[in-house]
Image: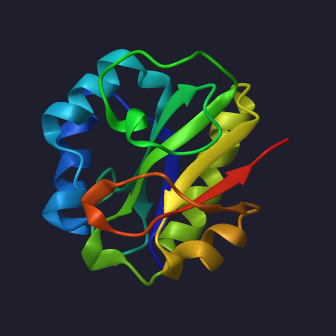
Amino acid sequence: MIKIKVRRAYNVDVARIAEIEKGAFPPEEVLSADRLRWCFRAFPEGFAVAEAAGGGGAVEAGEIVAAMVCRPTALRRITNEIYETKELPKGDTFAIMTFIVEPGLQRQKLGERTIAAALELFRRNGVKNFSLACKDHLIKFYGRHGFKLAGESELKLGGALWYDMYLGR
């Protein structure tokens, strides 16, 4: 089992996050490297990465294997606005824009361990509420981490059907 350490991301990590993002999603759903760089400049506090800490053989210690990108906002539901570069209402919610695990390392509980540690990292820094949009096959995954289904999302990313989920008060 790959041991991980979840930490805040650094600017230098954005290229690796973009690489994982590109491999994890269909092209029409990918956050581009340019958009991720813009996000990091605008809200670096919303980036967390999981880096290998040893014990996995398949990856070297220090290699980023998963990431979460969140946008601070007052919006409790996910809309296309979350993914745009315009200013959003300030608030107490982190909208999860992407949560990714290196595709070749999926199905090894990295997602389970990363999301738990990333949410805890953000909570320690005062974040109380989280929202996200996911496809139906991920509803149970996020539900195991306390997210509640809020219904069909207004998100129109890639033409897919998305579901909003919420964690918090």
Front residue of 160/135: it is 160
Question: In this rendering, would 49 be left or right of 143?
Answer: left
The quadrant of the image that shows the C terminus is top right
Viewed as shown, does residue 42 lie left or right of 111? left
Please tell me which residue is depicted at 76% across the width and 35% down the height of the picture: 128
User: Is 83 displayed left or right of 128 in the figure?
Assistant: left
Judge by depth and name the residue closer to the eye, 84 or 110.
84
Vertical placement of 22 versus 48: above or below?
A: below
Farthest residue toward the right?
Answer: 169
- At 50% across and 24% down in the image, what residue appears? 45
User: Residue 142 versus residue 49: which sits nearer the camera?
Assistant: 142
Query: What is the x, y in percent for residue 155?
Result: 42, 52
Q: Is residue 124 visible?
A: yes
72, 133: nearer the viewer: 133
Number of marks in the image? Answer: 0
The residue depicted at 63 percent of the width and 67 percent of the height is 142
Where does residue 108 sit, x and y in percent of width and height?
46, 82
Image-based side of 11 in relation to 141, left or right: left
> In the image, is residue 156 above or below residue 101?
above
The coloring applied to the image is: rainbow
Q: Is any atom of residue 12 visible in this view?
A: no
List x then y, in percent, for residue 18.
Answer: 20, 47
Residue 124's x, y, as percent? Answer: 73, 32
Residue at 48% across / 70% down in the picture?
Answer: 110
